[in-house]
Amino acid sequence: MADEIENLFKEVDKSNDGKVSLKELGRMFKTLGIKLSVEDVRQIIYKFDKDGSRDIDLGEFRELIADVLSANKGYEDAYEAFKVFDTNGDNTITHEEVRKACQNLNSKLSETEINELISKMDTDGNGVIYFDEFAKAFACGL
């Protein structure tokens, strides 16, 4: 994996200066199909730029990739949990599906606690829980 990360770094480092700039990092994410604003990319650099150079060297790039892979694993875990609730497979979770899942999991939550859980996940209040709402709740430990 380490050699793959170094190869990716060299591919992203179009200027061949041993650093990945804001522009180069933005292009990498765009190539991967991840749409980020310039400010988002700047925040990523800020997070991983340990030496304050305003760009990413190979060591910092390794940390960034490890973080991205970890986030992807969290996404996969959230999706697997989402599927437990989404019993009809329509990529949404209804209040009834949450109640049934809690019963099937032998949850000892009261009806009031289930309703509170649902209201925390259904952030737009439209009566269904979409994956993005579920994933945020999952990441927060709800």
Image (tube, rainbow, N blue to C red):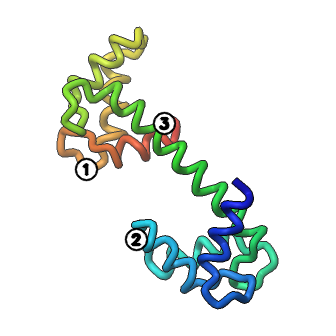
Task: Classify residue 82 as left or right of residue 45.
Answer: left
Compare marks 2 and 3 and give the one earlier in the sequence. 2
Relative depth, front residue between 54 and 120: 54
Between the C-alphas of marks 1 and 2, the distance is: 23 Å
Compare marks 1 and 2 and give the one earlier in the sequence. 2
Between the C-alphas of marks 1 and 3, the distance is: 23 Å
Secondary element at image label 1: loop
Q: Residue at x 33, y 22 (%)?
A: 112
Q: Which residue is mark 1?
A: 124
Q: Residue at x 46, y 40 (%)?
A: 76
Q: Which residue is mark 2?
A: 35
Between the C-alphas of marks 2 and 3, the distance is: 22 Å
Which mark is on residue 15? Answer: none
**Residue 9 pos. (x, y %):** 66, 72
When the figure is inspected, residue 2 is found, relative to residue 22, above or below; the finding is above
Categorize mark 3 by other alpha carbons within 10 Å: few (<14), some (14-19), many (20+). Answer: some
Q: Which residue is mark 3?
A: 77
The amino acid type of the residue labelled 1 equals Asp
The amino acid type of the residue labelled 3 equals Asp
